[in-house]
Image (tube, helix red, strand yellow):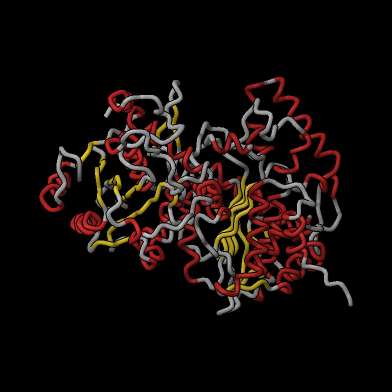
């Protein structure tokens, strides 16, 4: 029997997953996603069209020739890495209409790996070979000069191709395809150049240099009348973690890790890997001096950030050696070399718990089996238009005051069990889904988020939920941020039977500084690493946990930083507060408070 050869897109994915090709974590996850979708995509209405994928891959060497450097006048043969990208973008389709699956693609790669020529070639294919009449293809950027980089490659490719120059009319700032009334142009945000466009394909170069989201936002708005528009973003790494580039970098991480499911988002990110220990400590980039992190000075790991390195030859290797040598000799240039050549985001930044560590704690929680069990609650009130989180935490041991004699408090095999409720206004759901690219509507449908009528949070819904929960569970304490909580504190007493003093249903003001937050933050880290916490795989909490940015003081204390966390973290904060109160009543083995009295713990936590 003739041996079947997998499609080049799938072959690359198999070689990466089987570790026949060096790759970093994100390329591995992108390839694993492709292979998984080949098996299960049909269930979500997706399929991979090998014929279409092959057509666009073959377009490059058949019609395009390089025009400069070591590859001048040679056909543009895609590398395996590039075949995976191109094959994925064009090959994945929806069963319902046979149109393209992906609407946005974020590709982060080191300088010199051919991102711009690849994008230019993709733009030409979209112009003349993508079955779209009246196609508008744009190379878009903030400045006219930046927008011209991709267009220049496409322009030169077209002029050098006998076939393309016959069907296209090639001018200085426009490539027209008259038979289909289509064109390819560079545009920028200067002089209102982005307004009134109806793009079929948008190629955005070096998005890390964009000061805001204007280009992406206006181009995305213009695609609404197109059948299968695609916005392709190609970039190096940046340094501004409040930028649109980092937002899309972070969103791509969540899609590849499975924190969010977005079948219309394609992501491929090169770069160096953080070791497991540093990742567990919240580090998102390799740490200089760590013997286990990838070292940007080590040629053995350069291919992770430069996936086309082996095909670019000795000149490119010499270029990288020169960049590293100069960075070693001139420390002031190290950050730019790290960013441009090795895809390392250089601003100081610490994540909390890695997604795979947190996902490993998706143990089942059945609220009905917790009836009567003592729990501790955290309530993180949002602004009137955002998400409010109510989290109940049920420790596996008994309250400290019930300890008698030599009874072993720690013999239970159970875990900390987490029960969550989330609330947000009903009227702005659709707008928030579009703006945040977060599936709030799906989570509402699945019952993970409760909507309240109108465009602001109706706190009566939260109070009703608390009434029901307090009848089911034994809520010992309810912790809340003292800021802006005066009214709901009164309502909790008047309508839900909570009190300011006592042994049950006690309201506790919980500070948001290091004194209050550090101990439970560290305790949750420990519980997650040892798989002693069960969160039932709640997707809203998973998403919020992936958003948490941790800040640390000189003494090693930790707490979430809401300002640097680009998305909502309310559920994580509510959980930290609840665990913090539980820690004052329970002393788990190897706790950060082991050996301290209750009074000493209270002093340490500064409530």
- Horizontally, is 566 left or right of 175 in the view? left
Can see residue 456? Answer: no
Along the line of sight, which residue is nearer the eye, 67 or 486?
486
Q: Residue furthest front?
A: 405
Report how many numbered discs are placed on residues in the image.
0
Split into 4 quadrants, where in the image is the N terminus?
A: bottom right
Locate residue 271: give its quadrant.
top right
> In the rendered view, would you say 294 is above or below 168?
above
Q: Could you say which is closer to the camera, residue 6 or residue 200?
A: 6
| Residue displayed at 24% across by 44% down | 476
125 to 112, vertically: above or below: below
Whether residue 286 is situated above or below residue 313 in the rendered picture: above
The image position of residue 526, as x and y in percent, is 48, 37
Quadrant of image for the C terminus = top left
Residue at the spot x=30%, y=51% of the render? 373
Horizontal side of residue 506 vs 16, given as left or right? left
Instruction: Identify the residue at the far right of this view.
Output: 1
Q: Position of residue 150 (x, y in %)?
A: 66, 52
User: Can see residue 474?
Assistant: yes
Please, which residue is most extreme toward the left here? Answer: 494
Horizontal and vertical percent for residue 216?
50, 54
Q: Quadrant of residue 40?
A: bottom right
Given residues 327 and 531, the one toward you in this image is: 531
Report the residue at 89% width, 75% height from top.
2
Q: Position of residue 128 (x, y in %)?
A: 68, 70
Q: In the displayed structure, does residue 39 sit left or right of residue 212? A: right
User: Residue pushed farthest bottom?
Assistant: 96
């Amino acid at each position: 029997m003739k041996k079947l050869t997998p499609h080049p897109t799938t072959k690359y994915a198999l070689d990466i997953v089987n570790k026949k090709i060096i790759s970093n974590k994100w390329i591995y996850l992108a390839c694993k996603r492709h292979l998984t979708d080949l098996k299960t995509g049909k269930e979500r209405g997706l399929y991979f069209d090998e014929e279409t994928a092959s057509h666009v891959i073959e377009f490059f060497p058949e019609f395009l020739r390089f025009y400069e450097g070591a590859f001048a006048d040679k056909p543009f043969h895609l590398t395996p890495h590039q075949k995976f990208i191109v094959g994925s973008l064009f090959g994945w389709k929806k069963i319902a209409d046979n149109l393209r699956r992906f609407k946005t693609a974020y590709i982060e790669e080191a300088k010199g790996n051919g991102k711009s020529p690849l994008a230019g070639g993709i733009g030409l294919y979209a112009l003349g070979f993508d079955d779209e009449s009246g196609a508008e293809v744009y190379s878009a950027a903030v400045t006219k000069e930046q927008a011209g980089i991709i267009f220049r490659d496409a322009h030169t490719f077209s002029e050098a191709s006998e076939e393309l120059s016959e069907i296209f009319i090639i001018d200085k700032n426009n490539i027209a395809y008259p038979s289909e009334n289509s064109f390819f142009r560079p545009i920028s945000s200067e002089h209102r150049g982005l307004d009134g466009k109806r793009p079929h394909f948008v190629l955005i170069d070096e998005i890390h240099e964009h000061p805001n989201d204007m280009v992406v936002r206006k181009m995305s708005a213009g695609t609404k009348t197109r059948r299968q528009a695609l916005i392709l973003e190609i970039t190096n790494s940046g340094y501004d973690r409040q930028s649109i580039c980092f937002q899309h970098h972070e969103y791509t991480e969540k899609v590849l890790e499975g924190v969010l499911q977005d079948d219309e988002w394609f992501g491929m990110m090169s770069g160096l890997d953080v070791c497991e220990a540093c990742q567990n400590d919240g580090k998102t980039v390799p740490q200089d001096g760590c013997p286990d992190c990838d070292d940007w000075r080590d040629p053995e790991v350069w291919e992770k950030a430069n996936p086309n390195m082996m095909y670019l030859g000795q000149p490119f290797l010499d270029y990288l050696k020169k960049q590293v040598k100069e960075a070693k000799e001139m420390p002031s240039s190290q950050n730019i070399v790290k960013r441009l050549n090795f895809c390392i985001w250089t601003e100081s930044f610490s994540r909390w718990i890695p997604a795979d560590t947190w996902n490993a704690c998706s143990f089942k929680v059945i609220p009905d089996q917790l009836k009567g069990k003592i729990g501790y609650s955290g309530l993180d009130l949002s602004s009137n238009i955002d998400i409010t989180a109510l989290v109940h935490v049920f420790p596996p041991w008994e309250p400290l005051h019930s300890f008698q004699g030599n009874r072993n408090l720690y013999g239970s095999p159970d875990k900390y069990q987490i029960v969550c409720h989330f609330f947000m206004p009903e009227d702005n759901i659709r707008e928030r889904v579009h703006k945040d690219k977060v599936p709030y509507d799906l989570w509402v449908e699945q019952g993970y988020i409760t909507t309240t009528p109108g465009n602001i949070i109706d706190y009566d819904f939260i109070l009703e939920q608390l009434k029901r929960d307090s009848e089911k569970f034994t809520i010992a304490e309810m912790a809340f941020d003292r800021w802006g909580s005066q009214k709901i504190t009164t309502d909790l007493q008047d309508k839900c039977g909570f009190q300011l003093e006592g042994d049950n249903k006690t309201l506790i003001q919980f500070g948001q500084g290091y004194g209050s937050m550090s101990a439970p933050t560290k305790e949750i880290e420990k519980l997650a690493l040892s798989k002693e916490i069960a969160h039932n795989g709640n997707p809203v909490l998973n998403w919020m946990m992936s958003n948490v940015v941790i800040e640390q003081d000189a003494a090693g204390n930790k707490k979430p930083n809401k300002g640097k966390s680009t998305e909502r973290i309310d559920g994580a904060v509510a959980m930290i507060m609840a665990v913090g109160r539980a820690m004052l009543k329970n002393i788990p083995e190897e706790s950060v408070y082991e050996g301290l009295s209750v009074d000493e713990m209270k002093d340490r936590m500064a409530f």
